[in-house]
Structure formats: C-alpha cells, structure tokens
Image (tube, helix red, strand yellow):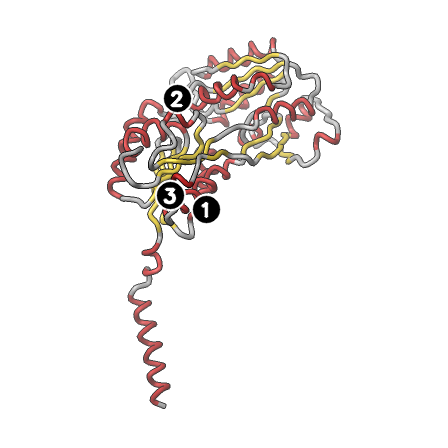
Amino acid sequence: MLRGKLYDLALLVISCVFGLFPAVSQAALFKVLVVMSYHEDFYWSKDIKEGIDRALRDKCDITYFYMDTKNHFEKGEEKALEAYKLYQKMRPRGVIASDDNAQSMFVVPYLKNKVSTPIIFCGVNEAPEKYGYPASNVTGVLERSHLIESLSFLKQLVPSVKSIGFMMKDNPTSRAFLKYFNSKSDSYPVEKSEFELPGTLQEAISVAKDFKTRYDALFIDNMGGLPDENGTPLTPEVIIPKLLKLYNKPTLCANMKPVKLGVLCAIIKVTQEQGILAGEMLLKAMEGTRLSQLPIIQNHKGKAVINVTTMKALGIRPAPMALQQVELIKTEE
C-alpha cells in the first residue's frame, strides 16, 4: 500500500513539474535568422521559406526578415543594416541568407569572417568567388537554371524554333544569369540568340516588339519589380501577361510562376530545393559539423512543365513523346 502511494506521489510531482514548465522542451530549439533579399509575398520567397521550414521547423525557432530589394533596391543597404541590428539583438545560433542582394548588402559587410555564427547562403546566381565564398563562417547553395535542358525541351515541342531572344529585368540576379548564359552559349540547340535587360516596363514592351520580328522564341523571367511610367514597381502578374500578349509566339523560362502566367514551357528549378538544402546544411553546422566539411553545392532537381492554355492558343501540336513525364498546367485566372 505504501509503495503504491509513493508511486502516485511521484507521478503527481512529475505532472506538476511539467505543468509549471510547459516550454522546457522548446528551450533546446536553435534560434535561426533567415534574411530574404525579396518581399514576403514574392513567389520565390514563399517557396524558399517552405523549403527552409520543412528542413528546420522541428528543431529551430526561425525568424524571417525581408529586404524587399526587388521592389526597392535603393533601400537595400538600409534594410541590410536593420537585419544586422536584428542579428545583434537575437544572437541566433545560425543564419540563412537568400539570394544575391542579401550577400552583397548583408553578409559580406556585416558577418563574413567577422562572427563565429555559421552562415548558409542559398539562391546565389553569381560565382561564389564574387563574395569571397567559401569563407571561415560561410558556405551554401548556388542557384543554377536548367537552361540548355529548357531549350532542348522547347525544340521538342516546336522543332521549327531556330533562334531565341532573352529578356530579364535589369538587376544583379539577371546580370549574374547573363554571365551564366554567355558561359553556356556554345551548347545551345539554337542558331542565334540575344540578351536584353530592360529597366522599365516601356523598355520591356519595346524589346518584346523588336524580338517578335527577329526571333522564333522568347525566354522571359525575373521581371517582378519592373517599374511603370510612374516609377511604381509592378508584379509578375501584371508584367508577364502583357508582354506575352505582345510577343504571341513560343516562350520559355526558368521558374514555375511565369509558366502559370502564360509562358509556354520550361524545365523549371524546384525552388523549395534551395531552402531544403540550405536548411539541412545549417542544421549540420549548428550540430557541430565544421563548415570546411560542408562544401558549396548547387541545385539539381528539375521538372518539365507546359502551359496547355498557351499551347492550344498558339496551335502547337507536340509529338506524344514530348508530353511524357510532363506536368500540364493552365494559365492562372
């Protein structure tokens, strides 16, 4: 009888302890700061966040900071300073910095080789050497498009395509993509190509009209934030359908969102992969793996997608083989 009472008392004590301290298990979570180059509602930011959350949510308390440089590049350095002040206040166990602007404006000036906190980058289009990566406390994930694969896929759908024009908004990401474009040009399955970086919507409209007369197909991506005649940054939902209507010929891109907006096809990057890989690397670093044992890597996953609304509108009838293992989607309303 006495043993039973002692057992019941022990259970009561244990219950009281856990009742008084319900968050004890949470104390073991790693504090992580994620600095995003772009804004919270941007599809790319959402997808990378989804990947990071998937990799870290069970072991980390994650705080997100958005620099909004796609819409307001001129305020990027000011936002980077805000991010650094947040870093100082939080004292996180680890940091993820997404896309190029977060590297040049935040990591390099404030954190690289200056703190012991492990920093993992993702979504970086530039060569890592531009930022001095890898560094003593920095490694991460490069972003590379499946460009040659996308061009070959387009040729499967529309064999008559022999020339292509490329158009992306003028910003650091697009300029880095242009370097990648030039480095691969000898491998393109097209006879000629040209790359333009418009800085305004009106310039983009002029490029679309010009390319329509000279090229069989158009590559269009990374157009979000392009300003109108009043200087107001516009969303991809406004820009891309307008340009596609003007061009009205086969198109391709590198990401899912433009396909949903009416671009014909792509071998798209799986954006969440950037966040998952960065999260996995950071978790290893926070658990004790040296960054020297975590070399810089790049994304590899790709997925073939076709916008069937656009395909039908252009009268394209691909061979059945071209539609195998392809995701078919309709234009967003």
Amino acid type at image mark 1: Ala
Asked if the residues shown at circle 2 and circle 1 are in contact, with their CB atoms under 8 angstroms apart, the answer is no
Q: CA distance from mark 1 to mark 3?
A: 19 Å
Asked if the residues shown at circle 1 and circle 3 are in contact, with their CB atoms under 8 angstroms apart, the answer is no
> N-terminal of the two: label 2 or label 1?
1
> Quarter of the image containing the N terminus?
bottom left
Q: Nearer the viewer, mark 1 or mark 3?
A: 3
Residue 289, x across and y down, in percent: 39, 46
What residue sits right under mark 2 in the picture? 232
Count residues near mark 3 (Cα–Cα under 10 Å), then give few for <14, some for 14-19, many for 20+. Answer: few
What residue sits right under mark 3 in the picture? 290
Figure disc tally: 3
Q: CA distance from mark 2 to mark 1?
A: 36 Å
Residue 137, x across and y down, in percent: 34, 37
Count residues near mark 1 (Cα–Cα under 10 Å), then give few for <14, some for 14-19, many for 20+. Answer: many
Q: Nearer the viewer, mark 2 or mark 1?
A: 1
164 in relation to 117, above or below:
above
Residue 129, x across and y down, in percent: 40, 26
